[in-house]
Amino acid sequence: MTGPADRHLRFDGVRNMRDVGGLVTSDGRLIRRGELFRAEALAAPGSGEAYAEHSDALAAHLEPLGLRTVIDLRTALECERIKGLWASTAGARVIEVPIPEGAPGSDNDIFAMLLDGRLSHLTAERLGQFYIEALSRRPREFATAISIIADQAQRPLLIHCTGGKDRTGLAVALLLDVLGVPLEVIVDDYVQTGRNRPDRAQGFVEMFAEAGVAIEDARVLFETPAEAMEIALAFIYEKYGSAGAYLVAEGGIDESVLTRLREGLLEPEAVR
């Protein structure tokens, strides 16, 4: 099986970009490389610690990927505050599929809740419950993103939110389950985001200290604990049986779209 290091794309200023391809399904089929990528948002230098930093050299690095489409899961407010630059840098078109959960101004903005005292301590379990809230509230948005990815004319494609962790993590987890990737591999792909950015919380120590919040009480917000994704997927499995069934029942997606997704992203023969 391809390891996480083999899928990680290392460009200056970009820390959390990787090819979703290279993972292997339960029946031994390989996800095609070069079709789907995930990342954090790309923005102008100085936009903030969460973002990848644009550079003049990046376009040349992206050109061989041949990106056609970029799915931006951020809200209109987020996009207005920080302009996303993946599409313009790669010469691709952007499709906005806003998922407000956790975003500035939302009723479950965990970042703001920690700063203003509505939430005193964030645990992996609470993060998992937040993921359940997002899945429960936004099935049609997740289904829309999956439908776009299933369209061969849109690929190669990159999907991102702000840090490439929560909204992107859920969307990719749903997709991997539809493709038949084992649970432990799905969870490990989510955890990989934290491995790519192990020191992310350190950039926010001063901000939280000024609000009287110890960074340890907020650290999970910047991490990817396996337990959080396990809780989210357990919700899907217990209520629907699979991500595909969830997307059909709640997202209104057609089974034919899921079939196209599998046909488009999976190699036809099992690896030996």
Image: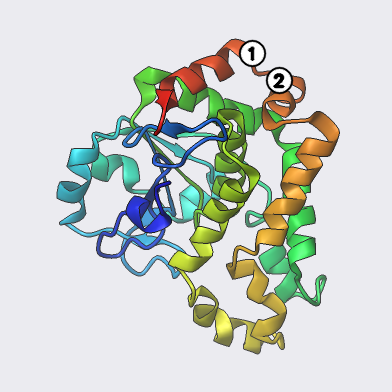
Q: In which quarter of the image is residue 113?
A: bottom right
Q: Where is residue 234 in the image (x, y as percent from the top left)?
A: 78, 45
What's the residue at 35%, 27% (across, down)? 155
Disc 1 crowd, CA 10 A, few/some/many (<14, 14-19, 20+) = some
Q: What residue type is labelled 2?
A: Val
Question: Disc number at residue 254?
Answer: 1
Residue in view at x 50 percent, y 55 percent: 162
Label 2 packing within 10 angstroms: few (<14), some (14-19), many (20+): some
- Give the residue at x 48% y 77%: 199
Question: Which of disc 2 and disc 1 is earlier in sequence?
Answer: 2
Judge left or right: residue 187 versus residue 241: left
Q: Nearer the viewer, residue 42 or 75?
A: 42
Task: Give the residue at x 79% y 62%.
Answer: 126
Picture coordinates of residue 220 (x, y %)? Answer: 66, 71
How far is mark 1 from mark 2, CA to CA? 6 Å
Q: Left or right: 96 with respect to 180?
A: left
The residue sitting at the front extreme is 272
The residue tagged 2 is 248
Q: What element carries label 2?
A: helix
Q: Residue 108: in sight, yes or no?
A: no
| Residue 103 visible somewhere in the drawing | yes
Quadrant where the C terminus lies? top left
Instruction: Establish if 83 lies above or below 138.
Output: below
Nearest the viewer among 37 and 201 is 37
**Left-right relation of 264 to 107:** left
Q: Reply above or below: 58 against 181.
A: below
**Residue 84 coordinates in the image, percent (x, y):** 39, 49
| Residue farthest to the top, as pictured | 256
What amino acid type should be assigned to the residue bearing mark 1? Asp
Label 1, secondary structure: give it.
Answer: loop
User: Badges 1 and 2: C-beta atoms under 8 Å apart?
Assistant: yes
